[in-house]
Amino acid sequence: MTIDPQQLSDAARNSKAWPYEEAKRLAKRYPGGKDGPVIFETGYGPSGLPHIGTFNEVLRTTMVRHAYEELMGYKPEDGRTRLIAFSDDMDGMRKVPDNVPQPQMLAEHLGKPLSRIPNPFDTDDESFAAHNNAMLRRFLDHYGFDYDFISAADRYNGGAFDEQLRNVLRNFHAIMGIMLPTLREERRQTYSPVLPISEKNGVVLQVPVEVVDADAGIIRFTDHEGETIEQSILSGKSKLQWKVDFAMRWVALGVDYEMSGKDHTDTVVQSGRIAQVLGGRRPEGMIYEMFLDANGEKISKSKGNGLSIDEWLAYGSRESLAFYIYREPKKAKNLHVGAVPRAVDEYWQFRGNYADQPLDKQLGNPVHHIHGGKVPSATLPLTYGLLLNLVSLPGVQDKHIAWKFVQRYAPGTSPESEPELDELIGLAVNYARDFVVPGLERRAPTEMEAKALADLDAELAGVDPATSAEEIQNIVFEVGKRYEFASLRDWFRALYETLLGSEQGPRMGSFIALYGVEESRKLIAEALESAK
């Protein structure tokens, strides 16, 4: 269905969904519109490989970009917005990462810009940073992001940042006035907004500097050997301190929007003040909360306590990860494998509701932002949770076997006609194998539970295999009402624990319809046998 752009724009202005709230602040930044494209930026440090935080930031920024286009009535092909993926590959390597080859070779180049460190990987990339930049671009391309890649090294070395570097020297004392009060006394003694790169050993030097000639880009400093050096900072001969670098980059590239994690709150404030000194403006941007691990601790790459994007995608779809990332960005969330099943099912629930919702509700639906307004119409005949219960059973822990049950439950489906369902079955098999089956332990029913199970078996004996899940659910309800369970919840818990080996489970009507009446009766027979 094609929506009138003006109608969409009006609805977007009234929407409270967070991407539109961010977009509205951008719209206020340029009440009459901007002459050139509105620039969105995400930053990446190529000292390591792309990870789930990279995906998180690019995805959320892309959502705001799309929301802004809808708000303003722009079409993507008009080129009125642009997303820059910026690699800070002029940063000096502070330590050798744990997960890279040839660590001893890399250790010999500590302190040098990442773009000037040899490539330890078995690839043709010319440097360590070039390899990781290529990984980033493949990563972003794989997920279909629309972006322009910019390398800090290319801009520094090629002279594109030279005018802003001169600008930093012209405003050297004002920048020092912003930064020094934020530093410890010891750090103040060595701090400089500009980090010269030694012409002797190629290391990014952390030394105080003196401005000799701002317009010529000349500074003076004492190097590691005690020699006083006068050197240009232009054309790749220096690197700015990171808070100053943020500000310079915002001004040089005309960045209008960049979001940051909560741990960079102070950076955003100080860099914003420096950007103003340089004659620019701090970009708009959301401060988002950080992900936590299963124990509620902040995720750290060095600790390895987080969930990688590959780990999520081994058990859940890409859309489910996008759904999880979309929800409540300003609230800390636990990112662990146990969050996958719920995220998958909630994504499909919201997607199933989308087509029948009025426009204002659609714009508040997470799937609108996940799919850039082009939400697929296909739905699923069953939930991921139900699939997990199915493929956790003995003899069904195989994708091809699971499909036989699914096709009986949903005639006319096939791996070819339902590729998303096919993917989901495979993911459910993975999750059940690794996290569900090892913890399953069916208990024997109590005396009353055994009577109720026998009663349910007798009722199912007369049920046609084609009976609907809803009708079977009613039968299960009615059987439970005949016995003195404290509540029907206890009846269903007994079914889960004695038949499936878990404290929680699916709607039993749906499960029996999927697994099959006769197969379900065999589960009941096994439970009754264990009670003898």
Image: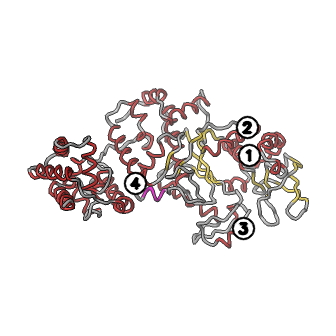
- Cβ–Cβ below 8 Å for labels 3 and 4? no
Amino acid residing under circle 1: Val
Between marks 1 and 4 in the image, the one whose residue lies nearer the viewer = 4
Work out which quarter of the rendered image holds the C terminus and state it. Answer: bottom left
Looking at the magenta stretch, what is its main secondary structure?
helix
Number of residues whose C-alpha sits closer than 10 Å to that of mark 1, classed few (under 14), some (14–19) or many (20 or more): many
Q: Sequence-wise, which precedes: disc 3 or disc 2?
A: 3
**Badge 2 is on which residue?**
273
- 459 left or right of 419 in image: left
Residue beneath disc 3? 109
Marking on residue 55 = none
- Extreme-left residue of the structure: 462
Q: Which numbered disc flags the more N-terminal residue, 3 or 4?
A: 3
Asked whether residue 196 is drawn in magenta, I would say no
Q: Quadrant of the N terminus?
A: top left
> Dot 4 corresponds to which residue?
316
Q: Residue 170, how many percent across, how many down? A: 83, 42
* Residue 136 locus on image (x, y percent): 56, 57
Q: Is residue 293 visible?
A: yes
Q: Nearer the viewer, residue 26 or 474?
A: 474
Amino acid carrying label 2: it is Arg
In this figure, which residue is indicated by the disc labeled 1?
244
Q: Of the residues under marks 2 and 1, which one precedes in the sequence?
A: 1
